[in-house]
Image (cartoon, rainbow, N blue to C red):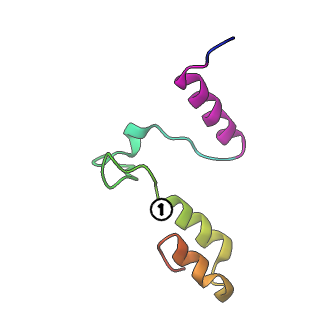
Amino acid sequence: MTAFGESIVEQAALARLECVGWQVRNGAAIAPGEPTVERDDDGQVVLAQRPRESLSALVGGDPRFKDAAKFVGKAV
């Protein structure tokens, strides 16, 4: 039996996400204090701004989806 280490699983997952159009970024590049900051602090795991932006792009100003935008914490 072959054991898979965490890094092998992580690299496979990141490669798959890139294949379907996700932008993979190094955690240090999006840390607080960096020009491309996406985290409020180093302990933040969920980057809420990304799903907000995606949802906003999908639903635009369609009033039928107003509550869906609130689900990710920001009205469209």
- Main SS category, magenta section: helix
Residue 9 covered by magenta stretch: yes
Judge whether 34 appears above or below 51 on screen: above
Residue holding disc 1: 49
Q: Secondary structure at mark 1?
A: helix
Q: Quadrant of residue 51?
A: bottom right
- Quarter of the image containing the N terminus? top right
Judge whether 48 appears above or below 67 on screen: above
Q: Position of residue 9 (x, y in %)?
A: 60, 28
Label 1 crowding class (10 Å Cα cut-off): few <14, some 14-19, many 20+?
Answer: some
Relative side of 61 to 19, left or right = left
Judge whether 37 appears above or below 24 on screen: below
Q: Position of residue 39 (x, y in %)?
A: 37, 52
- Quarter of the image containing the C terminus? bottom right
Toward the top, the furthest residue is 1
Judge whether 31 appears above or below 1 on screen: below
Residue 34 covered by magenta stretch: no
Which of 61 and 14 lies nearest the eye of the viewer? 14
Q: Position of residue 4 (x, y in %)?
A: 61, 19
Q: Position of residue 12 (x, y in %)?
A: 64, 29
Write down the region rendered in magenta: 4-20
The residue at the point 46 percent across, 55 percent down is: 47
